[in-house]
Image (tube, rainbow, N blue to C red):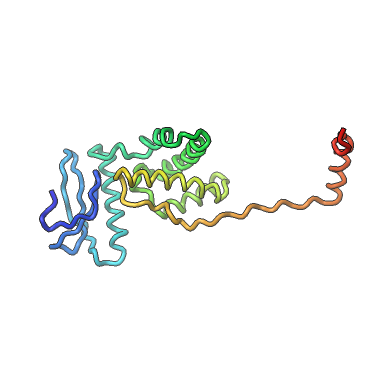
Amino acid sequence: MLTPFATLCYIPPVASYFTRKDSPFYWIRFRRADGTWGQRSSKVRGADKGALRKIHHMVAQETSSEALTGGDGSEALLDRWVPGWIKYKYVNAGTRTRMEYSWSSLSTFLKLRKIQHPQEVTYGLCHDYVKWRTSETNACSNTAGVELKTLGCVIQESVRRGWCLFNPCHKLGIGKERAKQKRAITKDEEQTIFKELMRTGIACGR
């Protein structure tokens, strides 16, 4: 249980953080292997620069650990629920196929990076995905951007379910790549095309 001094910041069904009036540090609320709750000081001072980022990272690690040990939150592991969620969430066949294709690429990358839980997805990881997608699979950055929108939908659903604190996939600042302009055909190519059209009768309407 939380102490009388605690100021609640967030209580999802997994690890979370809170502050206490009698302490300058953020505290972590975590689930033990037997299912009971415990708390400990993070040693991160709330007034320090970058404190919120640090405590979010520590909570993410704790949540991931809980999921992997089976104490709680194992249902949040991405590969356990995302494919089924896409199937029932997107009833339009075209949208569903597009989401499934995007998730296929995303899932491959996440497995390579050993990312299993929504809390482990970070802003930096999203940008790493663009680099990986464009260099390792020869996709354009526009494709990677569209796929990251799928990841954003997945993480937003995770936030709603209480599996992570926030969605780092929003406002990534990834610009769209301009489509390459096609080369204009030369006079010789134009004459060749016209001759072929004449030969097949297309130019004369036959």
Q: Residue at x 35, y 45 (%)?
A: 118
Q: Residue at x 29, y 60 (%)?
A: 52
Q: Provide residue 132's location: percent of width, then percent of height.
A: 50, 48
How many numbered dots are placed on residues in this image?
A: 0
Q: Is residue 145 left or right of residue 194?
A: left
Quarter that holds the C terminus: top right
Q: Is residue 200 left or right of residue 35?
A: right
Q: Residue at x 41, y 54 (%)?
A: 123
> Image height check: is 135 above or below 5?
above
Q: Provide residue 51's location: percent of width, then percent of height.
A: 28, 62
Q: Provide residue 101's location: percent of width, then percent of height.
A: 50, 38
Q: Provide residue 168's location: percent of width, then percent of height.
A: 39, 53
Q: Is residue 95 left or right of residue 195?
A: left
Q: Residue at x 27, y 57 (%)?
A: 55
Which residue, as the protein is rendered here, is positioned at the far left? Answer: 4
> Image height check: is 172 above or below 159?
below
